[in-house]
Amino acid sequence: MDTTDRRRASASSNLQSLKVAIQHIEHGRDQWALRWQALLAFIDVTILAFFILGPYLRAGPSYLIIDYTVAVWIGGELLARALAAPSIRTFLKKPMTWIDIVILATLLFPDLLFNFAFLRAMRIWAIGKSQLLCEILRRYGWVHLQDVIRACLNFLVFLFMVTGFVYTTFFYGREGGEGFVDALYFTVATITTTGFGDITLPGTLGKLTSVVTMIVGISLFVRLAQAVVRPYKVNFPCPQCGLQRHEADAVHCKACGHLLNIPDEGN
């Protein structure tokens, strides 16, 4: 084997090791993987904070520096996930891939594509689906709060998504944080159907935005309320009839009476 072949073999081996490491970070449950997942979740929350503080930072010289720094980070994440994916087709089928691509575009062209910046709130939804959240809840014995926390995160994602859309579409020209606060106030008043009427959205687009916000917002709010008040059940499919959810201490399936062997999630 000549020098060129050895270099190619070494590069291929290093690339495969990197791919395995990224996959382990995404799906692992040991201390090393969880620390990486916690760091990535913290960065996701920081990116969302940057979007929320955008109206205050936009006038300063540091805004574009932070904006392009976040763009480099998200671009690196996309490349890492593409490398770890079984195939490019699998990578492109994931919704978060396209969301991150749109987010990256808004970061690279903030003046041209500012109307799509609110999609950065979708990164909270990714945290709710991560292994890190499940493992933290399991380790601290809070597994029974999993449905409640995910419902809260879904509600927050929708709240920020609508607030961001309303702000960038109708209140973007206002100075400082006044426009964002007005957008948040309108969104909360619409979702809760309070409807004070002191802030309304003009035109057909404004009316359609209000209708969608009320319908979807009420649905998510009811789902959150159900998650809070309903008894906790574990996801454990019955081998006999396939019923998915059972009480945590169930011995037999309530649908068919089959003997269950539900593992203790606290261990």
Image: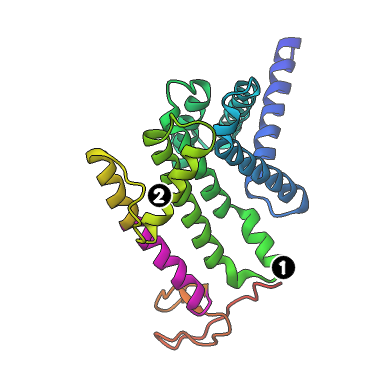
Question: Where residue 114 appears, x then y in whole percent?
Answer: 45, 28
Q: Residue at x 39, y 85 (%)?
A: 255
Residue 52 spot, x, y in % from top left: 56, 40
Mark 1 lies on residue? 140
**Residue 13 on image: x %, y %:** 70, 28
Quadrant of residue 188 within the rendered picture: bottom left
Work out whether residue 94 or residue 222 is closer to the camera in this orientation and state it. 222
Please report whichever mark, 2 or 1, sits nearer to the chain's N-terminal start. 1
Amino acid type at image mark 1: Tyr
The answer to if 100 sits in the magenta stretch is no
* Badge 1 element: loop
Determine whether, in the image, residue 57 is placed left or right of residue 4. Answer: left
Residue that sits furthest to the top in the current view? 3
Tell me the chief SS of the magenta region: helix
User: On screen, 123 above or below 31?
Assistant: above
State the quadrant of the C terminus.
bottom right
Between 243 and 5, which is closer to the camera in this rendering?
A: 243
Q: Which residue is mark 2?
A: 186
Between 266 and 186, which is closer to the camera in this rendering? 186
Q: Amino acid at mark 2?
A: Phe
Q: Residues within 10 Å of mark 1 (few under 14, many from 20)?
A: few
Residue drawn 53% across and 77% down?
232
> For the magenta stretch, what is the residue range?
215-233
Instruction: State yes or no: residue 222 in magenta.
Output: yes
Question: In the displayed image of the protein, which residue is found farthest to the left?
Answer: 204
The answer to whether residue 136 is visible is yes
